[in-house]
Image (spheres, rainbow, N blue to C red):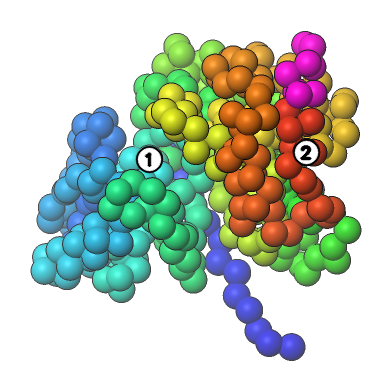
Amino acid sequence: MKAYSVFFANYTIGEDAYGQVPQVCLPFGKRIFLIGGRRAMDAAEGLLGKALEGSGLVVLESVEFGADCTYRTIDRWAQRAKELGADMIFGMGGGKALDTAKGAAERAGLPVFTFPTIAATCAATTALSVVYREDGNFDSFYFYDKPARHCFINTRIIADAPCEYLRAGMGDTMGKFFECHFAARGDHLDHSSALGREISNLCYGPLLEHGVQALVDCRRHEPSFALQQAVLANIVSTGMVSLMVLDDYNCAIAHSVYYGLVLLPGFEEKYLHGDVVAYGVLVQLAVDKDWDRMREVKGFMKELGIPSTLREMEVPLDREYLRDVLRETVTGPDMEHIPYPVTEDMIFEAMREVEELEG
């Protein structure tokens, strides 16, 4: 049997997470090239600088990643890292900044370390980047052999970030549990995918237990135990599932609904990815006729303040208006491995049932 390797996501979490940077990073060298978002670096670069004092580690240069993670931007910063003679790249910020840093490190042949400043995605721990074209539309996934060498999660910084990112992250994370189990249904899984599927349970249970309190604490800027559990689910548990399962099991109907809805004019600018994925979970559960879970998820979404109907997102339940949405939902790549065929009629009927669900 051919050998394969699984690389796990190492991480440090806590208010003093940056204090571990010297110990973790010094074996890789001393010269750092920092790529991040502007607001992220305003919030976190100073704390990182204090953690590096007297360690021998030095930030040669820090740059804003750009508007999007594109191959042009990735290549630009890879070249700059080489010109500086950097030993490693640090990525700081949200998903696009971290994806840019990971891509630049891959191109430059350097180790990368991630510093997420919001908990909206698992980009800090995954072995891929979502790359966009110069016009802002999706281009491709850029896959890597391994994730970042280490992820440093400062919960104080995340507690001070806008709480809607944490909320949307919980919506996206919840999707990982439901989609992974749905897509893998009926398959005989190898060890890695089976382990990843079991880890996906931690993308839902802990959020039900701690998610509402985590959001309350984030509004209060408190890096509490509940907030830490939600952050671990959003960044670590979801990333671990992504690393371990076959790509077939990473997404299903919930994400495909998202990619359909963002075709509507102005929709993507108004609603965060994870909030829409959570709505997609309801549609997936309606397609699957899992009414008890539907009611449970809808109640949880209402507690979090995530829109649970098209009506709340100002989208009419009109077959002609949703024509392109329905087509994209059933033909998107996330629908290539699901347990039974799903048609446009089934998606529209599921949306109708979600609209009518009380709770």
Q: Which residue is mark 1?
A: 94
Q: Position of residue 252 (x, y in %)?
A: 69, 48
Residue under the point 50% across and 55% down: 126
Left or right: where 249 falls relative to 32 = right
Where residue 288 appears, x then y in whole percent?
Answer: 85, 39
Residue projecting furthest to the front = 320
> In the rendered image of this protein, does residue 294 appear above or below residue 97?
above
Q: Residue at x 22, y 36 (%)?
A: 38
Q: Amino acid at mark 1?
A: Gly
Q: Point out the image quarter for the C terminus.
A: top right
Depicted 227 relative to depicted 337: above or below: above
Secondary structure of residue under mark 2: helix
Q: Is residue 356 magenta?
A: yes
Of 261 and 302, nearer the camera is: 261
Residue 207 in magenta stretch: no
Query: Relative to 254, is 10 on the left or the right?
Result: left
* Amino acid marked by disc 2: Asp
Residue 62 visible in the picture: yes
Q: Secondary structure at mark 1?
A: loop
State the CA–CA distance, disc 2 to disc 1: 36 Å
* Mark count: 2
In depth, the one of 269 and 238 nearer the eye is 269
Name the disc covering residue 264, or none. none
In the image as oriented, which residue stretches furthest toward the bottom? Answer: 1
Residue at x 54% of width, y 13% of height: 216
- Mark 1 closeness class: few <14, some 14–19, many ≥20 residues within 10 Å: many
Check the picture and name the quadrant holding the N terminus.
bottom right
Please identify the quarter of the rendering in which residue 189 is found: bottom right
Q: Give, as a single range, the part of the protein colored magenta.
A: 352-359
* Residue where numbered disc 2 is placed: 345
Question: Which quadrant holds residue 103?
Answer: bottom left
